[in-house]
Amino acid sequence: MESESASIELRSINRLLIDEDGSLARYWIPAYQRGYRWDRLQVTQLLDDIWDFIQSSEEKRRTSFYCLQPLVVRKLEDGGYEVVDGQQRLTTIFILLSHQNEILTLLGKQRFSIDYETRDRAFLDEIDLDRSNENVDFYHICQAWRAIEEWLAGRDRMHALKLLQHLLNDDEAGRNVKVIWYELAPNDDPVAAFTRLNIGKIPLTEAELVRALFLRRASQDDTTGNLSLRIAYEWDQIEKRLQDNSVWYFLQNADLDDANRIGLVFRLAARMEGHALNGEDYAVFSHFSDLLSVGQSAEIEWRKVKDIFMALEEWYEDRYLFHVLGFVLNQTGGGLSTITELLADSQAISKHDFSQGLRNRVYRMVLGSDLSAASPDELSEEITNLCRTVDYANAPKVRSLLLLFNLATLLEDPRSNIRFQFDSFKRESWDIEHIRSVSDERPSRPREQDEWLRHCLMFLSFMALEEWYEDRYLFHVLGFVLNQTGGGLSTITELLADSQAISKHDFSQGLRNRVYRMVLGSDLSAASPDELSEEITNLCRTVDYANAPKVRSLLLLFNLATLLEDPRSNIRFQFDSFKRESWDIEHIRSVSDERPSRPREQDEWLRHCLMFLSTAKEEDEQALAESIEAYLDPDSEPGSRASFEEIDGKILSFFNEATDGPDHDLANLTLLDSRTNRGYRNAVFAIKRSVLLENDRSGIFVPLCTRNVFLKCYSRTVGNVMFWTDQDGQDYLDAISRTLTRFFLGQAGASR
């Protein structure tokens, strides 16, 4: 690859936008490349790395830069560049610039163009997520787009602007991103360079190198490019078909280390041509390299490869061949020699004779004799004797017999279209086992006996756990207990012991006592109904944000007890969403002692308010929105606009949330998910209401009582639904007290 005319230099991403003449740079990805294959994680890692550099570059010299891996190109006669290596990062940068085209225009720049020889250029000009399933390249490009979208979704617009500025800074501005630019000499062979660059890399498989050989030869055989495009398209279709596990595990007993499964077809093609493939590295590549370099037609050799695949596909599609060949290939491990032999047989004789030959082969594999030499009565007797004499001591024979029994059963009815699932059978390693326990295999050692008994206990315990889940009352009450105790083994063991020792009614009553002790710290049985009501009311009035664990447990119990109120309801609390999304307590309306103090937090808080007020029609609402817009306008003079404190005060007054002091009582607390907590922590009631109700409409889990709070279902008199008043808070407290009192008294609809 070394050449006197080759050049290497550090080149900024900004320089990649234009060519030597100052025109927009054009990059061409030839057919011998494997296409775009980065996944979301790789895209996110690249963005994180660049952002980490940007964050740390403030303390570094202006000349500092973040360097990407080499970009190897060759200048084309039309002024564009053929990308030989590094197209994954180049394409990712292109996708990022496309995603942020608006900011790119704002910076007075235009993205470079990129064109894949084997793909529709229109897709790259305007990336359409709806076309992601058309081929593997489009799928990964759309995944990269979504990864960029998700990465930017957690940041405001200024982050995106800063990212693009540093990414596209020229060398004079500094603190930018660069690549190692390696430009091949005009007379260098790009395919040879590509092969040398990538032959040691794991991601580039031998199958992809063979593909590159075919496409290179095709471009020589057909200068119109049509043959290259057809081979590339058919290569994709074959690979896609083999990626279907039902097809793959029909042919093979295990997956390969290769990312591409089409390599199996190439290996078979080499074997059919007489190449032994004795385990040497790149033997298949060497075979096709020799074949295509001595004047052999790419179209003829590709047709041979395609014919092999079509034969395999015919075996799969034919229901009889699928099951019988599936048995043969399973027993022989799907070895190349077996498949090669079967392919040769199928080409040499008729389909009828081939099918008959397969029955003979299976008979020999199972019974060890020739099917053609046995009469129907002799055949029946041989099989009956085998079934009566074979046993667990000859496990392989039993395994093959039972597999064949399954396959033959499926073939009994010609009207059936059910197929044996070789993929599940092989991946889940199905094997023979006794239908019932056997007396000569009783556990004899103490450790084995203990383990056997544990299995029995596990089954009985599972039945109990399943009953807890199915019973709606136990599901909610035990769900509360296990949530509060972390679902520890000691707690579950204790509960299992209790459930087995007493009646279901007593167990349910005991659970209410346990919950009462967890929440109020005293014994339920010692309290009269009036005392119980008073205790709960006092707790609701006195507990506040300072005792967050107590509030959290109280609000969770309020949700569960509310769901149990109506015996006709079948709605269940979603503990999975509640725990995975880290729901926690938060204020219903904003609190005065938690006003945003940092400029960035203040801007974000005002944007939330502006988003809500943007559709306002009243004059005072529009005036408030205009004052926020003026404050957020980066071009406005500080002296010509109101201060944050003035606007903040007007907002709180407008939403009736201006208070003399902090409001951390239970009357102003509910459960919110962690994402809403982070994004709208101290937003006013109206904004939180809008976000929560939008989540609810979208089918995102919102606890029933949280939903009821923002719908003001507990308020006796509903005034303005956008405000949370002191009276609303009092009515909310009363609802909590009433619901929990009825629950502990056993008056809830589903109580036992």
Image (spheres, rainbow, N blue to C red):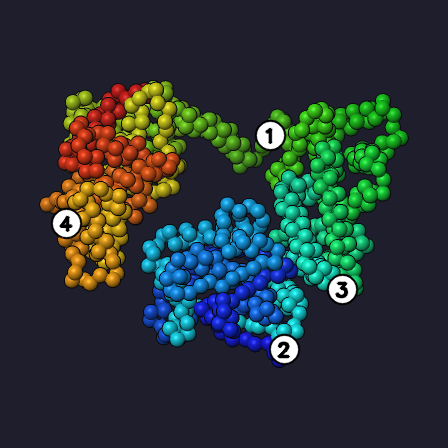
Between disc 2 and disc 3, whose residue precedes? 2
Residue drawn at (37%, 51%), measured in percent from left and top? 153
Residue drawn at (42%, 74%), measured in percent from left and top? 171
Which residue matches tag 1? 442
* SS assignment at label 3: helix
Q: Is residue 179 left or right of residue 484?
A: right
Quadrant location of the N terminus in the rendered image? bottom right
Q: Is residue 567 left or right of residue 223?
A: left
The picture places residue 96, in percent across and down from the top left corner, at 45, 58
Q: Quadrant of residue 408?
A: top right
Q: Is residue 463 above or below residue 328?
A: above
| Viewer-closest of 650 and 669 | 650
Can residue 520 be seen here? no
* Tag 4 near tag 1, CB within 8 Å: no
Which residue matches tag 2? 3
Which residue matches tag 3? 293
Q: Nearer the viewer, mark 2 or mark 1?
A: 2
Between disc 4 and disc 1, whose residue precedes? 1
Q: Is residue 738 above or below residue 184?
A: above
Q: Nearer the viewer, mark 4 or mark 1?
A: 4
Residue drawn at (81%, 36%), measured in percent from left and top? 351
Q: Which mark is residue 649?
A: 4
* SS assignment at label 2: loop
Looking at the rendered structure, the kind of residue marked 3 is Ser
* Tag 3 near tag 1, CB within 8 Å: no
Q: Quadrant of residue 491?
A: top left
Looking at the rendered structure, the kind of residue marked 4 is Gly
Q: CA distance from mark 4 to mark 1?
A: 79 Å
Looking at the rendered structure, the kind of residue marked 2 is Ser
Looking at the rendered structure, the kind of residue marked 1 is Arg
The picture places residue 353, in percent across and down from the top left corner, at 84, 35
Between disc 2 and disc 4, whose residue precedes? 2
